[in-house]
Amino acid sequence: MPRKKVISINPKTSVPKYRQLIDSILSAIERKTLKKGDKVPSINQICAEFKLSRDTVMFAFNELKAKGILKSQPGKGYYIASTEIQVEERVFVLFDEFNAFKEDLYNSLINSLKGKATVEVYFHHFNYKVFKNLIAESVGNYTSYIIMPAAFDNTNHLLSKLPQDRVYIIDRKKADLERYPVVYQDFEQDFYDALVEGKELIEKYRRLVFVNPGGKEPVERSRGFERFCQENNFKYEIVKSLAGIKPSLWEAYFLISDRDLVEMVKIAKYCKFKLGKKFGIVSFNDTMLKEVVAGGITTISTDFNEMGKTLANMVLSRDKSQIRNKSRMIFRNSL
C-alpha cells in the first residue's frame, strides 16, 4: 500500500505535525484506504520520509492507541484495531456580514447539523485583516471550515494553512480556490436567467435601471444585466447610487441595497406611481419582509435555506462537489 495515500504532512501549515499524522490516519480510515487489520507505516518510515522526530510520531500513535484505533504487536509494528471512529465534528464558519438572508442560511445550516456538530460563526465584515486573522487563529481548532471569501481575491495562501480536505467555500466560485468544494451563486447567469424568466412582465417598461453600488457586490451581475438588455433591445442604465436619479413612469429599477429599496418605495409613493403597473421595482436576496412591503416586492434570490442544507450535507459526508445554488425570480406586485 503506497504510504503517500495514508500519511500526509504539510510543512507549511501551522497545524502541529502530530495532529496532521493523527488526521491522516483517521482520514485514510474514513476513505477505506485503511481497514481493520491493516498495517500502518512504521515509526522509522514516517520519521525518515517526513523528517519527524520519534517523539512526535509516538505522541500521535499513543493518542490513536488510547482511542482504540491502533494496536501494536511487538516486533511487527502497528495495525488498525478499529475503524469505528467517533470524531466530534466542530465547524468553523466565516461569513462576510450578518443580515436577514444570512440568518436564513445560518439557521438552515445549524438545523441540518443539529446533534451532529457544534458550530462557531464569525464575521469579517469585508475587512481583509480581520479575514486573515480569523483564519490564522482557527487553524487546528476545528474539523471543518466553511469560508465566505466574498469580494476578496487571491486568498489561497491563507486557506492553504487549513487542511485542504476539510475546507468548503461558500457563495462565490474563486479561480484561485478551484481545488476546494464550493456551494456558489453564478451571479452573471443568475441575473440573466431571472430577467429571461420575467421578460413577459418586463417588456412593458421602456427603460431598465440597475443600481449597483459596487465595492463588496459581485461585478458579474452587471454583465448579466447588460447581456439581457442588449440581446432584447432594452434601453438601460447602470448606476452606482440613486443620487441625482429622477424616476419616471414606464421604468423598472433593479436594486441590490435594501436602503435603496426603501428609498425607491418612498419615491414611488411620493410621485403616486403604482408599483407593478407603470413603474417597477425588483430587489435582490429575498426575505420575509419583502413579501409584505409595499404590497410585495419582486425579488431575484437564491434559496439560502437550500444552501445551508447542501453545506451541512457536504460537511457530514465529506462531499467534494462544486454545486451551483441557482437563483430565481420571485414574482410579486412590484413588477
Image (cartoon, rainbow, N blue to C red):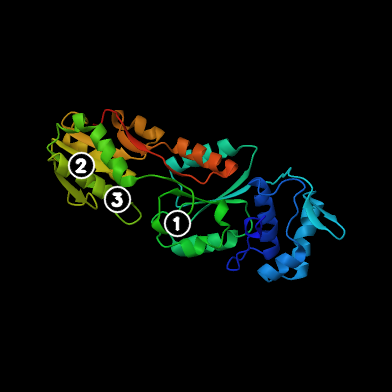
Residue 286 numbered mark, or none: none
Residue 213 location in percent, x, y?
28, 52
Counting from the top left corner in percent of width and height, residue 296 is at 31, 29
Q: Which mark is residue 177?
A: 1
Disc 3 residue type? Glu
Q: Earlier in the sequence, mark 3 or mark 1?
A: 1
Q: Position of residue 192 (x, y in %)?
A: 26, 41
Q: Do we see residue 184 in this rendering?
A: yes
Q: Which residue is tagged 3? A: 220
Few, some or many C-alpha atoms within 10 Å of disc 2 (few <14, some 14-19, many ≥20)?
A: some
Residue toward you, 138 or 57 = 57
Quadrant occupied by the C terminus: top left
Residue at 76%, 64% in the rendered image: 43
Q: Nearer the viewer, residue 119 or 14?
A: 14
x and y, in percent, of residue 104 in the image: 47, 38
Residue projecting furthest to the front: 1
Q: CA distance from mark 3 to mark 2?
A: 13 Å
Tell me the SS state at disc 2: helix
Residue type, mark 1 in image: Leu
284, above or below 156, in the image? above
Q: Is residue 42 left or right of residue 268?
A: right
| SS for callout 1 | helix
Q: Which residue is mark 2?
A: 228
Above or below residue 273? Residue 172 is: below
- Mark 1 → mark 2, Cα distance in angstroms: 29 Å
Q: In which quadrant of the rendered view does residue 190 lie?
A: top left
Q: Is residue 256 visible?
A: no
Q: Along the polypeptide, which appears first: circle 3 or circle 2?
A: 3
Q: Residue at x 77, y 47 (%)?
A: 37
Looking at this view, name the residue that lies furthest to the right: 74
Between disc 3 and disc 1, the foreground one is: 1
